[in-house]
């Protein structure tokens, strides 16, 4: 047996990720999405928990100092579930990631943008946590909103954070007023991959779950 033969199993596992995502989207009309349940939030967090579990396992296996950052995977996963719901014919929106909102220098390129034909409905900025920018995140997000409104006056801006661990969360009174409306945080005091999924489920911010974000986007599209 050659090394290249052994490598094929790993290569096939990489290909299977794309094929699995594609297969879910291909049958998305065969099952109902209930936005009054928490199914999407649970599926998203279980996916993130499994991703981080594997990253920590690989870190130990290869004696790495750090795991591979999960920021891009978080954006990708959120984009997938938004696509799964919002691109259904009865809703008729279109999801993009890292798309420049205008073809001109200086135009913003949000993590996720939601479109109805050529009209931008909303953007979602996704962060795993805000500890790296705990003193300036609000200023940065407000600047993003200002740029957005200058280009699409009716578009909405949302901030979705995976966990409040390392930065304390949306605790100020003005932040609390926007929680579940403009600001969303999925986990309190927990980081995926460091504990069991049963424990993760005990630390979900249900008042700012992803279903509420989706409902807000649908409302914005209807009122646009």
Image (spheres, rainbow, N blue to C red):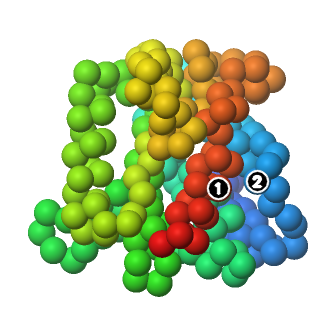
Q: In the drawing, what numbered circle is on residue 8?
A: none
Q: Is residue 10 left or right of residue 114?
A: right
User: Where in the figure is residue 201, as x and y percent of width and height?
Assistant: 76, 26
User: Where in the figure is residue 51, as x and y percent of width and height?
Assistant: 62, 38
Count neighbours of disc 2 (C-alpha within 10 A) and say few if under 14, some if 14 to 19, many if 20 or more.
Answer: some
Camera-side residue of 69 and 86: 86
Q: Judge whether residue 85 can be spotted in this image.
A: yes
Q: Disc 2 versus disc 1: distance between alpha carbons? A: 7 Å
User: Where in the figure is residue 101, as x and y percent of width and height?
Assistant: 30, 70
| Outermost residue to the bottom | 117
Is 39 situated above or below 87? Answer: above
Is 12 situated above or below 40? Answer: below
Q: Disc 2 or 1, which lies upstream in sequence?
A: 2
Residue at horizontal 53%, vertical 74%? Answer: 94
Residue pointed to by mark 1: 215
Count neighbours of disc 1 (C-alpha within 10 A) and say few if under 14, some if 14 to 19, many if 20 or more.
Answer: some
Residue pointed to by mark 2: 35
Camera-side residue of 214 and 103: 214
Q: Quadrant of residue 69?
A: top left
Is 199 situated above or below 72? Answer: above
For mark 2, give the secondary structure: loop
Camera-side residue of 84 and 185: 185
Residue at horizontal 27%, vertical 43%? Answer: 142
Q: Quadrant of residue 113?
A: bottom left
Check if mark 2's residue and mark 1's residue have beta carbons within 8 Å.
yes
Residue at horizontal 40%, vertical 83%? Answer: 118
């Amino acid at each position: 047996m050659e090394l290249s033969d052994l490598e094929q199993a790993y290569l096939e596992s990489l290909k299977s990720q794309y094929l699995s995502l594609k297969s879910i989207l291909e049958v998305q009309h065969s099952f109902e999405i209930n936005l009054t349940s928490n199914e999407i939030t649970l599926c998203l967090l279980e996916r993130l928990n499994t991703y981080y579990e594997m990253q920590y396992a690989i870190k130990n296996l290869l004696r790495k100092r750090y795991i591979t950052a999960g920021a891009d995977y978080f954006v990708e996963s959120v984009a997938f579930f938004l696509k799964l719901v919002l691109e259904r014919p009865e809703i008729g929106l279109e999801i993009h990631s890292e798309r420049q909102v205008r073809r001109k220098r200086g135009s913003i390129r949000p993590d996720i943008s939601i479109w109805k034909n050529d009209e931008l409905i909303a953007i979602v900025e996704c962060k795993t946590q805000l500890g790296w920018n705990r003193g300036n995140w609000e200023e940065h997000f407000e600047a993003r909103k200002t740029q957005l409104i200058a280009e699409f006056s009716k578009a909405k801006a949302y901030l979705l954070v995976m966990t409040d661990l390392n930065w304390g969360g949306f605790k100020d009174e003005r932040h609390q007023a926007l929680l579940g409306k403009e600001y969303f945080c999925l986990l309190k005091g927990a980081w995926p991959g460091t504990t069991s999924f049963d424990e993760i489920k005990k630390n979900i911010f249900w008042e700012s779950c992803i279903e509420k974000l989706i409902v807000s986007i649908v409302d914005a599209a209807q009122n646009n």
